[in-house]
Image (cartoon, helix red, strand yellow):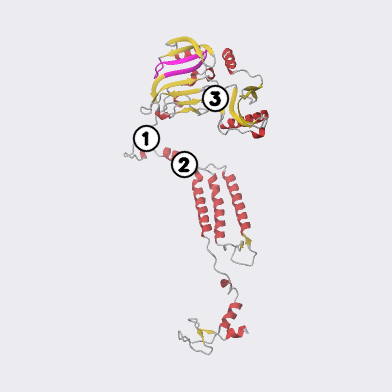
Amino acid sequence: MIKSEVATLKFCSDCGHQLEDEAKFCVKCGTKIPGETINTKIDEYLTTPDYGNSYSSPPKKKRRGLKILAIICFIIAAFSVLMATVETIMLAMAPFMIIIGIMFLILSGTEKGSESFYLGKTRNSNPLKKKTFVIISLIAAFVVFVVFESTLSGINFPKPKDKEAFTSESIPTSTKPIDASKPTPTTPEPLKVILDVTKFANITSDELKRILGEPSSKESTTYEGTITAPCEYYYYNSIEGLSEVEFLLINDKVIQMLTYTELDYRGGKDILARVGIANPSSTFKAVDQSTAVRYRCPTGEIDDVWISLIDSEKDTFGFLRVTYDLFYSEEWYIPLSVEEQASYNVATESSVKSILKSPGSAKFPWLDWSYGKNPWYVAVQSYVDAQNSFGAEIRSDFTFIYDAVTGTLVYAIFDGEVVHNEAYVPLKDLVKQAASAD
């Protein structure tokens, strides 16, 4: 019934205007009508292979975002090839990024929102899931990267500096063009060492004399510091570039040198190297001000370097003191790293909780902790708020002292009472023992 109704319809083949059944000419454009009906067009539409497929689905939405990602991948691949002379691994990145770029390019041509697609134009095969395609592409890219990287790791690519050296040496001097407009490059001024302070570390008076000769003057007195001990001061005014330099000796060992001389500061640049400390093991600054800087333990044999009387306008400084054994004058002077502080915090909190009546109520401060270190001990000080046996919250101060080598607890004071003592020797006694042993 439907087919017979459709067969009675006629349309102009030129303009598409609907015609009467017996019309011979199109009333709109005047074209002669051959008598073909739309039924013929429907039969052709249904019987012609793939004729209707191009009209069966709406046009696909363009996925420009994925195309942009593909272009970025190809750009990175090209950049990787250019950078291969600097790092070999960059060349292995090129095929990796190419595969990822191709993946994005293929996905950009698929229908948005669909879970699968046909990889080729033919649709006789089963569709490929997008997730599976992405996983396969990533695995392939990674495998190719590993293969390229392992293959190229043994190849020595020429570095830019090697090429520059080659071209510079291979051109005869007489053929090199000279640009008179450019200034002639100058050799950087070598670093001038004010005084190599490292050579005086813990040496005897005889060794000091062998280096500098007899002192201009000498003084015997008493040193007041961590301990009270006899000492000697050796004064020299013959060191080139310096005014009077004094050396402090305790038990016939140089523990400190000091000079008041106006010297170039150069903004603090290479200041440690200019006093002979070329490769400091630590750059911790105990003081960092406009008029003074102080470095703690820059080497294993130097405990303190103090530079003061800095004049920023003249770019000079007037005071230099180097201490080799600081424990004669200070009890706690070696800085702790952040990792060390965290480790001792955990150990101390655990020990404090074991003392408390109500460890679950303990509240420790976040920042109010003090640390100290010397060759023998590490000291940790702070406080805790916790409930006592009556349920009232009280604050208790504590000091815990650990062995600097083993990290074991040797002494502890909690709320004014000694709660732990494991063969603890006071610091002053240790310093005296060290001084007498020397």
Res 270 → quadrant: top left
Chain-order first, disc 3 or disc 1: 1
Mark 3: amino acid: Ile
Q: Of discs 2 and 3, which sits in the foreground?
A: 3
Across and down, in percent, residue 263 comes to: 39, 23
Nearer to me, 167 or 245: 245
Q: Single out the mark in the foreground, 3 or 1.
A: 3
- What is the spatial separation of the Cα atoms under label 3 and label 1, in whole angstroms? 45 Å
Q: Is residue 402 left or right of residue 74?
A: right
The circle drawn on residue 185 is: 1
In the depicted structure, whether residue 11 falls above or below residue 298:
below
**Residue at label 3?**
334
Q: Which residues are magenta?
A: 238-259
Q: Quadrant of the N terminus?
A: bottom right
| Residue type, numbered disc 2 | Pro
Helix, strand or loop under label 1: loop
Q: Classify 423 as above or below 160.
A: above
Query: Could you tell me residue 107's position as x and y percent?
Result: 57, 59
The residue wearing badge 2 is: 160
Q: Is residue 343 above or below residue 67?
A: above
